[in-house]
Amino acid sequence: MKKQWILVVLVVLTGALVLAGCDSSAVTPGAEPTPTPAATQSAAPAVTETPDIASESPAMTDTASAAAAATDSTLTVSATESVKKMPDIAYVSIGVRTTGATAQAAQEENARITQSFLGAVKAQGVAEDDLETQSLNVYEDYENPQQTVVENTYRVTIRDIDTVGAVIDAAVAAGANSTYSLSFDLADRDSVYMEALAKAMENVGNKANAVAQAGGYAIVRPASITEGSAGYSAEPYMTAEAAAMDTGSRAGGATPVSPQEIEVSATVTGTYIIK
């Protein structure tokens, strides 16, 4: 009986050795065993969080506000106001024209008369700083090529309006004979313009309210205010040359000068948000 158990054990061991030999024969001699690949794990999907509206950046908030403002109803109106003032300064262009057989002769004669009329103008209260050379021309006489013409023109600023006629008379009497012109202005036109601008600003707001109310709206706030270009107008005046001719036609008469009011205007355009 004992011999039978020994025989069974030998048979089992022999079978195990045979099976082990078969498994090892599947491996190529000299080749390294192929490692078993590690299990591949799938990456977890990224989670996208929706930002809370309260945590949005100021830039996003401003953009949203701008977009909302773009849908607002607007009203655009313009207003022009003007201020009239009497002029307090005058400008006279006075010239001396002479001819001569040579340029030197014409120039010497011109200088003599020019000095004479400048002295006469200063005697009427015009300051030295208010005498400005406007132009000096020397050219051949078109009608008489044998003669040379010299023209010397001054711009005279007269700060006392009441003496304009006397200044012109004195210049003509001293020999001034060319290119007369006369214009009036305001010495401080900027301040008059600011006065007109203030009136236009007030008027544009009143006009916007009136238009909005007529349409059943109310002004919320101004969106933009734009200043327009300045305006300036004056009545036409008699030229100094015409005045001097008129003076010559009446013995002992004075040059008539009648300045009119100068009008300075300002324009304001406003755009308003309405609801």
Image (spheres, rainbow, N blue to C red):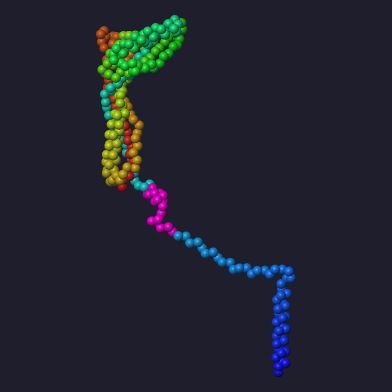
Residue drawn at x 71%, y 93% as measured from the top left: 2
Residue 253 in the image: state x and y as whole percent.
25, 10
Instruction: Say which of 37 and 158 sits in front.
Output: 37
Q: Nearer the viewer, residue 41 or 176?
A: 41
Q: From the viewer's side, name the closer residue of 101 and 275.
A: 101
Indicate whether 237 appears above or below 207. above
Quarter of the figure that contains the N terminus: bottom right
Q: What stretch is highlighted in magenta?
A: 50-68
Magenta highlight on residue 52: yes
Majority secondary structure in the magenta region: helix
In the displayed structure, 34 sits above or below 21; it is: above
Identify the residue at image location x=30%, y=26%.
Answer: 188
Say if 251 sits above or below 190 in the image: above
Residue shown at 38% from the left, 16% from the top = 133
**Could you tell me if residue 47 is visible in this image?**
yes
Q: In which quarter of the image is residue 169?
A: top left
